[in-house]
Amino acid sequence: MSDSMTDHLENTETGSALRRGWTTGACATAATKAALSALITGEFPDPVTITLPKGQQPAFALAHEALGKDHAEAGIIKDAGDDPDVTHGALITARVAFGPKGSGTFFRAGEGVGTVTRPGLPIPVGEPAINPVPRSLMIGVVEELAKDHNLSPDVEITIFVRNGRKLAKKTWNPRLGIEGGLSILGTTGIVVPFSCSAWIHSIHRGIDVARAEGQMHVAGCTGSTSERVVQGLHGLPDFAMLDMGDFVGGMLKYLRKNPVDRVTIGGGFAKIAKLAQGAMDLHSGRSQVDFDWMADRLNAIGASAELVASSRRANTALQILEEAQQEGIDIAADVAKLAQQKALALLGTVPIALDVVVIDRAGTLLASTPALGHDAL
């Protein structure tokens, strides 16, 4: 990978080039280096270059700089490349000041950066929501500059994100117990466009938080409507609701190693039908409803020959559902049962009870299974 801001990745669906970007952690690290350099020397390096965990050395232009008597600030506009990231364009600012001798490097949450309020995250309760890798990168910058200038690495770093409190409402932070703003994230420093890994990582953190809180019934839903129905059906707290989206496989694989007592999967008819077929990624670009499979299921549960034939020619799963409902055939219940079996098979022998809830687009409950474990297969 090059160290320029124009590094590209091919979009395999369209053939177009997708531009990689930089994480909030990388931006905070670069801002910290620029601010501390200015505090020590009186000059801001612009652009400022940092070294990422895998050796890449991107350069960042400064969007803000301020040098005070006992502190310095530097800010960088986050460029997420072509990833649909809520923090794209946000100003990430680091304010640095020397701390008491022997204090080491420590962190503060400035305006727009959240504070951890629940256990289960990789940062202790009460600490700024600055993840371990960004912390390590910033500490490394401090130690390097301190060594170069024969100083002790006793530095207070405060990170700010412009409009971070507002942006955080569009993330999973409130549900994870991160209050007051965004998290400073990143394991490699690089944002890969349309990467699934960040979403799945957030599902994992949601499970960690629920387990740490002793919440042993969690739910993963494909969207906000199914989430609302499932939460109301089971009376679950917000932090028990995992933002599963299309990544049912990612959720179940993590639960297999980090189990709870019960998990509910909720979603619309088409998404749950794809799970029933065995798909573990329910995105429309990566899995589709198999109408021949659906027709075979209708035939198995007693649908008319006309409905079976019509289903093979259907344009959408919704069409099949509506025609089955008109004939009094409960295809939703059949799909829910089969989806439950596929999900339990992925969980293996882990003792987790699992149930499936199917809704229509209006949020009407179409089917729900009893909670069953692997021994029911």
Image (cartoon, helix red, strand yellow):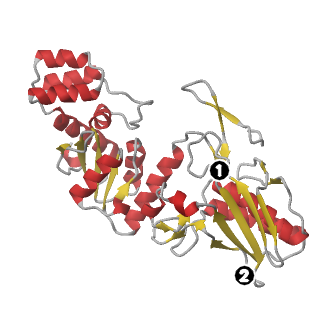
The three-letter code of the residue at mark 2 reads Ser
Query: Which label number is shown at residue 303?
Result: none
| Residue at 57% across, 27% down | 12
What percent of the width, then of the height, locates residue 92? 68, 59
What percent of the width, then of the height, locates residue 282? 38, 36
* 1 vs 2, front mark: 1
Query: Which label number is shown at residue 103?
Result: 2
What percent of the width, then of the height, locates residue 149? 90, 71
Q: Is residue 353 visible?
A: no
Task: Name the side, left or right, on which 19 lies relative to 348.
Answer: right
Query: Which label number is shown at residue 89?
Result: 1
What percent of the width, then of the height, locates residue 273? 28, 33
Task: Name the side, left or right, on which 217 lies relative to 74.
Answer: left
Nearer-the-camera pick, 179 or 98: 179
Task: Name the side, left or right, on which 195 lies relative to 76.
Answer: left
Task: Indicate the quadrant where residue 140 lies.
Answer: bottom right
Task: Indicate the quadrant where residue 33 lies.
Answer: bottom right
| Residue at 27% across, 28% down | 317
Nearer-the-camera pick, 73 or 176: 73
Please identify the quadrant where the C terminus is shown: top left
Please identify the quadrant where the N terminus is shown: top right
| Residue at 31% across, 47% down | 225
Task: Name the side, left or right, on which 125 lies relative to 140.
Answer: left
Residues packed near mark 1 inside 10 Å, few (<14), some (14 to 19) or many (20 plus): some
Label 1 element class? loop
Nearer-the-camera pick, 260 or 295: 295
